[in-house]
Image (tube, rainbow, N blue to C red):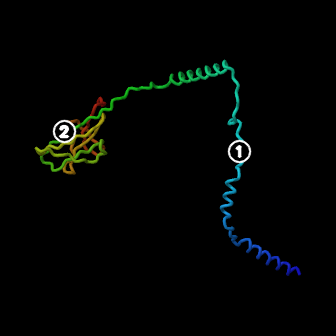
Amino acid sequence: MTDRIERDDEGFGARLGATLRASEPLPTGAEARLLATLAATPRPSRPVPWWRRPRTIHLSPIGGLALAAGFAGLMVLGTLGASRGAAPAVAAAAPDTVHLVRFVLVNPGARQVALAGDFNGWQAEALTPTASGGVWSVALPLRAGRYEYAFVVDGERWLADPALPSTRDEFGGEHSVLHLGVDRVM
């Protein structure tokens, strides 16, 4: 008997599970009615915190004037305190002059001349030959500062500018030094 009850319970559980797992189609228009009901239902309002609740304050005219004078005094004191340690509102602009520098190399035997320096990341940029031949030049806008550069002749030979002082780098190469718009520091 107990065995039969257990089998009936298992069968009942299986039938109930199958019924519960089966999808149930909604009646026509159920979704629209549900949305309309939700839209018509008033939403619960949240309680307003105490600092946002409206309050009525009664002031006499003299009290209002005293409050306004106190506020104005705080504004004046705050402005004075902030301006004591602050920089002036208008500062003199430092001159940022750009100089147009013409680099020239006279080398009649050269087929190609380029200029490389710390102002262009030591990337050789080609110079333009003049009509007379043998004279190579380029004009570059540079700000005040100290610059090192060299001419690259025919893509192989690095030459310092003979018109300016030169220095040797850590690789043994010789570069020209140009001081533009600054005092020389030795």
- Circle nearer the viewer, 2 or 1: 1
Q: Eyeballing the image, is 8 above or below 131?
A: below
According to the picture, the residue beneath numbered tag 1 turns out to be 46
Q: Residues within 10 Å of mark 2 (few under 14, many from 20)?
A: few
Looking at the image, which residue is at 31% across and 45% down? Answer: 121
Q: Residue 171: percent from the left, percent from the top?
A: 29, 46
Q: Residue furthest right?
A: 1
Looking at the image, which residue is at 18% across and 38% down? Answer: 162
Q: Residue 18: percent from the left, percent from the top?
A: 73, 74
Q: Secondary structure at mark 2?
A: loop
Looking at the image, which residue is at 82% across and 76% down? Answer: 9
Q: Eyeballing the image, is 12 above or below 82?
A: below
According to the picture, the residue beneath numbered tag 2 turns out to be 162
Instruction: Tell me: 49 left or right of 164.
Output: right
Classify residue 21 by image quadrant. Answer: bottom right
Q: Amino acid at mark 2?
A: Pro
Q: Amino acid at mark 1?
A: Arg
Q: Residue furthest left?
A: 132
